[in-house]
Amino acid sequence: MTSACHCTGCQKMSGSAFSLTALFPTEGFRITRGVPVPGGLHGATRHEFCPNCLSWLFTRPAGNDAFVGVRSSLLENPQHYAPFMETWTQEKLPWAGTGAVVSFEAFPAPQEYPALMARFAQR
Amino acid sequence: MKIQGGCRCGAVSYHATRDAEPAVYACHCLYCQAWSGSSFALHALLPEGAFTLEGPIEAYSVDSGHHRACAVCHTRIYNTTPAAPGMWVLRAGTLVQRAHLNPVAHIWVRHKQPWLALPSEAPTWDENPTPEAFAAALAPASAAQVAP
């Protein structure tokens, strides 16, 4: 599932208006070269960066080992990852529109994710 | 006028006193998309030394660009580049004042994400504008914001 997060933390970590994420099942995700370094708040949600250029690569969300949130703008063909969902719109920069189908003022509740993912898969 | 900002974790902060708020522009090139983890970078061009940085800074170089980031959370604060000699390219998403700083120009829109709708009033360039055209695009915002 693809998303954009407008929270102030993502604004700072991206240096931009929002961050972009594509959630992938952890079992299908492999690091094929290099050893990422941790950054962000160094808390239960783990943000991993390139050790050379410090690009923000991916996030392992707290309490959910099943998925990895990859920064979709680093993927090949980033245009294929238009955000389906946007989160933290209460902190959104006023001019920054993503065209996302579903919007949340903060994060959706964990129990809402299965239905959101089903909707994403059917779009 | 005081401008200030900082990184995600709070270890690094910066501040400056300036005549006007900085003009912010968006670069949609593929490098900026990768650097940011977003669909564009938000930048403000400021003269070298324009702000004072405090906290643990990590300095590193990639190709011809020199970068400064927080050593703890790795939020990038600014870079220098031969393309803009004498300037610091600030990551405007780290500015406290960012919520009311609308981008005054969008560059490299030939690589803009197709789902992104841009405000109609800001000028756009397919690639890099000429230095003269870019200076003209960035100047009115600064001038307007100087007015009391």
Image (cartoon, rainbow, N blue to C red):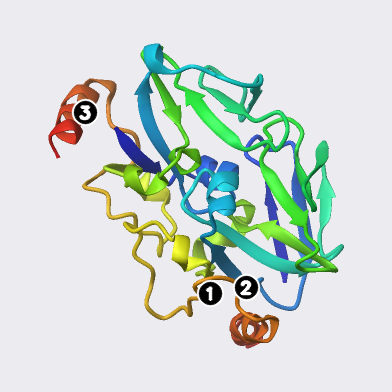
Whether discs 2 and 1 lie on one chain: the answer is: yes
Kindly identify the residue that appears in the image at 80 percent across and 53 percent down: B64
The image shows residue B58, relative to residue B126, as above or below, that is above
From the image, which quarter does the C terminus of chain B lie in? bottom right
**Crowd rating for badge 2 (residues with CA inside 10 Å; few <14, some 14–19, many 20+):** many
Q: Nearer the viewer, residue B20 or B88?
A: B88
Which residue is labeled 2 in the image?
Answer: B23
Kindly identify the residue that appears in the image at 77 percent across and 68 percent down: B84
Q: Mark 1 lies on which chain?
A: B
3D distance between C-alphas at marks 3 and 2 = 39 Å
Horizontal side of B141 relative to A123 (left or right) equals right
Q: Mark 3 lies on which chain?
A: A
From the image, which quarter does the N terminus of chain B lie in? bottom right
Q: Provide residue A109's location: percent of width, then percent of height.
A: 27, 26
Which residue is labeled 3 in the image?
Answer: A117
Among the two numbered marks 2 and 1 on one chain, the one whose residue lies closer to the N terminus: 2
Tag 2, which secondary structure?
Answer: loop
Whether discs 1 and 3 lie on one chain: the answer is: no
Badge nearest the viewer, 2 or 1: 1
Kindly identify the residue that appears in the image at 51 percent across and 42 percent down: A10
Quadrant in the rendering for residue B140:
bottom right
The image shows residue B145, relative to residue B74, as above or below, that is below
Q: Nearer the viewer, residue B107 or A3?
A: B107
Tag 1, which secondary structure?
Answer: strand
Task: Tell me the amino acid under the disc marked 2.
Answer: Ala
Quadrant in the rendering for residue A38:
top right
Q: Provide residue A14's location: percent of width, then percent of height.
A: 56, 45
Q: Which of A102 and A83 is in front in this view?
A: A83
- Residue A49, which numbered label? none
Which residue is labeled 1 in the image?
Answer: B105
Badge nearest the viewer, 3 or 2: 3
